[in-house]
Image (cartoon, rainbow, N blue to C red):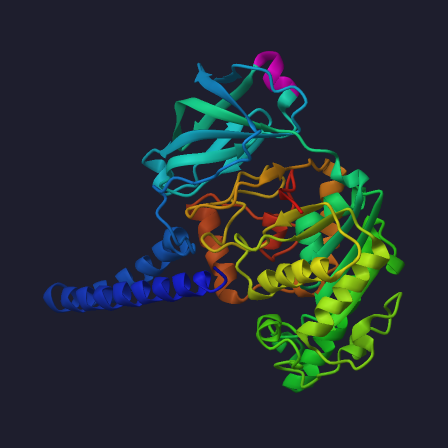
Amino acid sequence: MAGRKQQLLERHRRHKRTALLVGLLVLALLGVLLAWWLVPLLLVLGWVAHEAWFADHLFYSPGDDYRYAFPPDTRQLPAQVVDGVLRVDGDFAGADTLILQLDIRADWLGRWLDPRVLVGGDRQDFERGVRGRRYLNLSGQGAALAESGLPIRGRFCRLGAGATLYALSNPDYARRRLMVIAPHADDAELAAFGLYSAAAEASIVTLTQGEIEAEVYQPLGLDRAAAARLKGRLRSWDSLAVPLWGGVPQARCVQLGYYCLQLPAMAERPQQGFGSRESGDDDIRSARRHNPLPLPGDADGVASWDNLVADLAALLEHFRPEVLVTPHPQLDPHSDHVAATRALHEAIAASAWKPQTLLLYANHLHDNDRWPMGPAGQGIALPPAIEPLPADGLWSPGLSAEAQLDKTMALAMQHDLQGRLPAKKRARRLIQRLLAGRRWPASGEDEFFRKAVRRHELFWVRPL
C-alpha cells in the first residue's frame, strides 16, 4: 500500500490536467462567440472556485462508506438520535474509547461548506458532499452519554436516526514503559506528545536525520549539499531536545542518523549502505554524537538495513519497553513510516526483549490530506478506511487544554514546521476562509498545527 498514494495523486493530476484542457477550450470558444473579456474574467473566477472548493486532495468518493472492523470482543450497542439527543441502549461502563458509527448525508450547503457533527462539547468535521457511514469519536464523554444522553446535531448535513456505539476498554498505556518510534524528527510529537508527556517512563527513537528538501536554508549562502547537512543537524537536534519539553530526558532519546527516504531501498538490500540523497553524507555516526549509549551501527557507520535492525534490537533490550508506538503500516503511506515499522518487527524478532503491544499512529493518509478535518482543538473522528483494515482495537486518550498548548509549543520548536507558507498557499487559505468558512490556528502556519493539536490522540492497538 506504500505506493498507493502516489498512484492516486498521479491519477488526480491527470484528471485535473484533462479538466483544465477542456475548460480552456470552452473559454476560447466563448471568447470567439461572445466577448473576449469573458475569457480573463472566467479564468479568475474559475481559479478562485478551484482554490475554495476543489483544491483538497480527496482520493475517494464522499459517498463511499468507511469500512472498519473491530476485535470480536468489542461491545456493540444500539444507539438512536431522537429529538437531537443521542441515547445508547446497554451498558458501556468501563470503556475508555467510544466510537459511534452512523450515517451522515450532506445537505446542499454541505457540498460547499464542511459538514460537521456537534456532539456534546465536541465538533467533528467530514468531507464536503459526505453521504455514507462514518465514525465519530466520543471518548471522554461516556459519563454524560450514560447519564442523560448527548446533544447531537448536524451542521450542513443530516444524521441517520439509527447508530451503533463501539465501546473499547484498554489499560492506561501511559502507565507502562513506552518506546516511541519516530521515522523523522517531529513524528513523535505529532502523533504522541500527549501520551509520552503523561507517561511514567518513555523513550523516543528517531530513525532519520530528515535532511532533504532544505531549499529554505540555501539563501544563507549554502549550496544544496551544505543546506541539507544543516537541516539534518537541526532536525537531529530537535529529535533530542524537544522531548525534554514533554518531560523525556535526553538520556532516553536516541537519534540513529539514517537518511531520509532511503529506508525502503535499505530494506531491499539489507547489507548495502545508502547515503543521503542531498547532503552527500554516508556515515551515520555524524548524527549520533549526543546519543546516551553505544549502538551496533556505531562500529562502521554504514547506513544499512542490517545496522538499523541491530540498533533497534539493542534499544529494545536497553530500554525494555512494554508498549511500542509506531506508524500504522496499512494507514500511513509515507515510505519511511512503512519501512520503520517493518524494521521494528524484524528487531523484535531478533531481540531478547519482547514487548507486549503496538500502538499504531497515522501522521499521513493515502486518501485525504486534510484528516483530521476541521479546526484545531476539536476531536478526531476515525480517518477514511475505504479498503478493509485489520480488526485492531482503538485507544483514544484525551488531552486537556494545558496539554494541547504544550503540544502546540512542542510543534513550534520543530524547525521543519516553522516558516511561512508559499504565497500560493496563503492565497488559498484566504479564499477558503472567506468563501468556505475554514479556520486555521494562530499558533503556526504549517497544516500540522491544525491537524495534530486536538482533544484526543488516536492509536490502533495491536497485540504482539
- Let me know if residue 279 appears in the view: yes
Height in image: 190 above or below 346?
above
Majority secondary structure of magenta residues: helix
- Looking at the image, the residue that sits furthest to the left is 33
Which residue is rendered at x = 61% and y = 20% of the image?
A: 92
Height in image: 190 above or below 296?
above
Say how many tags the image has: 0
Q: Position of residue 315 (x, y in %)?
A: 80, 61
Q: Position of residue 31 (x, y in %)?
A: 17, 67
Height in image: 266 above or below 93?
below
Height in image: 451 above or below 130?
below
- In depth, the one of 338 and 23 nearer the eye is 338
Is residue 336 rendered to the left or right of residue 2?
right
Is residue 112 rendered to the left or right of residue 100?
left
Q: Position of residue 312 (x, y in %)?
A: 75, 63
User: Does the segment drawn in magenta span residue 117?
Assistant: no
- In the image, the segment drawn in magenta is 143-148
Which quarter of the figure has residue 132?
top left
Is residue 154 rendered to the left or right of residue 149?
left
Which residue is rendered at x = 88% and y = 66% of the image?
A: 293
